[in-house]
Amino acid sequence: MISKSPVENQILYVTNFQDFLSTPFHGNSNAICWSRKLNGDFSEIVNQVALNENMAELHPDELLELQLSEQGQFAREMLLHDLKVLKAHGASPTLNVIQSYERDDSFPFFPTDVYSFHVDRAPIPVDTFLCTYYGASSEILPNSQAERKVLVPEIREELKKLYDGDEDYFEYFLSEQFFDLHYLAKANAQPISLGLGHLCRLATDHPNRKVPPCIHRAPQEKNRQKRLLLIC
């Protein structure tokens, strides 16, 4: 079964893993989400992971070593299941406990960290998979409600001040520095939260793509609350 989100039909919601993998992007739809209800206590897992830095990858063998209550065990089973089915599909998922991401302050007028609305680029036809199990969830933005930052005149002029090469290679410079992947939300834009527990597939910028890549960003953490995120 497939249903659509009310905002420009951007998200297609499915109810099983097979449809999640096989449903094609089309029209304005560049995100597909397997809509699920979380079972278990994911906070129990997050609270047992010690962070020496801002983020730590949680491996299956480490998950299995955790001493958990019954609700914690339900949460662990869901995580192990998602890792298993995605790996069987040929993906390389990672499970991260995140306090915060690194901030990019190289160019104050143009941060290129994951808190900025951006698209993912790949040299081959692949999609981005992600799922937030705990904490603030990832957000996407309808393409019609965003503008590429490199096309905003004021920003473009600032970027030209950074570039001291041949004008013919300016576009290459923007691509090489990943500036061209970032977007500015228009006035009155309405970002869409992907919610908790939904395994989502986002269209990327790759050769032969049939829809615009999905614009997304990491959320601002609330009250230093950690996140539990699967991504590949």
Image (spheres, rainbow, N blue to C red):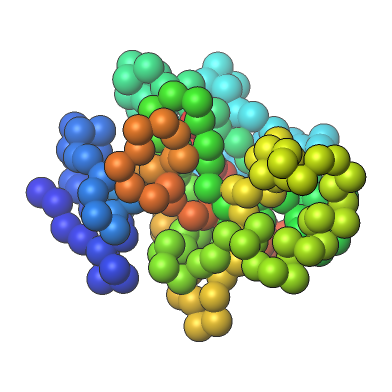
Query: Which residue is drawn at the image coordinates 33% and 47% (left, top)?
Result: 211
Query: Which residue is drawn at the image coordinates 50% and 59% (left, top)?
Result: 139
- Residue 11, given in percent of the width and then of the height, sits at 30, 57
Disc tally is: 0
| Left or right: 182 in relation to 129 | right
* Occupied quadrant, residue 208: top left
* Occupied quadrant, residue 116: bottom right
Please say whether residue 44 is visible from this viewpoint.
no
Residue nearer the viewer, 222 or 180: 180
- Residue 147, given in percent of the width and then of the height, sits at 54, 65
Please say whether residue 142 is visible from this viewpoint.
yes
- Residue 154, given in percent of the width and then of the height, sits at 74, 71
Residue nearer the viewer, 185 or 62: 185
Q: Is residue 44 above or below residue 192?
A: above
- Residue 14, given in percent of the width and then of the height, sits at 20, 48
| Left or right: 221 in relation to 53 | left
Residue nearer the viewer, 72 or 193: 193
Q: In this view, does 206 lie above or below 214?
A: above
Query: Which residue is drawn at the image coordinates 26% and 45% (left, top)?
Result: 25
Residue projecting furthest to the left: 1
Q: Is residue 39 above or below residue 192?
A: above
Query: Which residue is drawn at the image coordinates 29% and 58% (left, top)?
Result: 28
